[in-house]
Amino acid sequence: MSIVDSVIAAITPPETEDARLRATQEAKAVARSGDWLSQILEHHRGIEAQFERLRAAAPADRPREQKQLGVLLTAHAVAEEAAVYPALAADHQVGHAELAYQEQSAAKMEMGLLERLDPASEDYHDKLEHIRGAVLHHVYSEEGTWYVKLARSAPAADQQRITERYAEEYARYMGADAPLFSR
């Protein structure tokens, strides 16, 4: 972890597991079966599970697990960036939309840097934990406030448009017949 990352982590410690769980529960309470928010919640849980598979993998298996994580993160990011973040901006959450774009861009870059590290090294482990922490915080922000507000305030027609666009973009990246998570 860089010096800047260490300072930021010290100043803004991550939210607790309990806080993340409460945020997820609130988002689940607002989501409707099959809507954009329920799809995103399912994807978030799948991404978290893939992080755990990568963390638990033997060094020789990490490149494969890392590649799968990258695919899931990218498919999810592309779908959010095309469908949800513009809706956030239209819902008077421009700052949240812009921050979300920046966070996802940073995660993609960090994943690319992770590929350059020896999967058995401490640097690899540190970078992976940094990425995981950033993604968990991003998920917390989305589930804890941004998406709940959007789900409660956007008109029904907008909700339908977000649902359709999110599913379309996710399928475009993953393939129309691809399961959400193959494990």
Image (cartoon, helix red, strand yellow):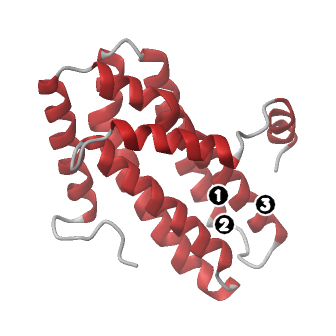
Q: Which part of the image, by quadrant, shows the C terminus?
A: bottom left
Picture disc at residue 126: 3
Name the residue at 49% across, 44% down. Answer: 24
Name the residue at 83% across, 69% down. Answer: 122
Circles 2 and 1 in contact, beta carbons < 8 Å: yes
Percent across and percent down for residue 97 are 43, 25
Q: Which amino acid does label 2 sit on?
A: Arg
Picture disc at residue 177: none
Circles 2 and 3 in contact, beta carbons < 8 Å: no
Mark 2 or mark 3: whose residue is earlier in sequence: 2
- The answer to which quarter of the image holds residue 94 is top left
Name the residue at 79% across, 37% down. Answer: 13
**Of the two numbered discs 2 and 3 in the rendering, the one whose residue sits closer to the viewer:** 3
Q: Name the residue under label 2.
A: 116
Percent across and percent down for residue 37 are 32, 42
How many angstroms separate mark 2 from mark 1 (CA)? Answer: 5 Å
Q: Outermost residue toward the left?
A: 157
Percent across and percent down for residue 129 are 72, 58
How many angstroms separate mark 2 from mark 3 (CA)? Answer: 13 Å
Relative to residue 182, is residue 152 depicted above or below?
A: above
- The answer to which quarter of the image holds residue 46 is bottom left
Q: Which amino acid does label 3 sit on?
A: Asp
Name the residue at 73% across, 40% down. Answer: 14
Neighbours of disc 3 within 10 Å: few (<14), some (14-19), many (20+): some
Relative to residue 113, is residue 24 depicted above or below?
A: above
Q: Mark 1 points at which residue?
A: 113
The number of numbered badges drawn on the structure is 3
Regarding residue 106, the answer to whether it shows in the image is no
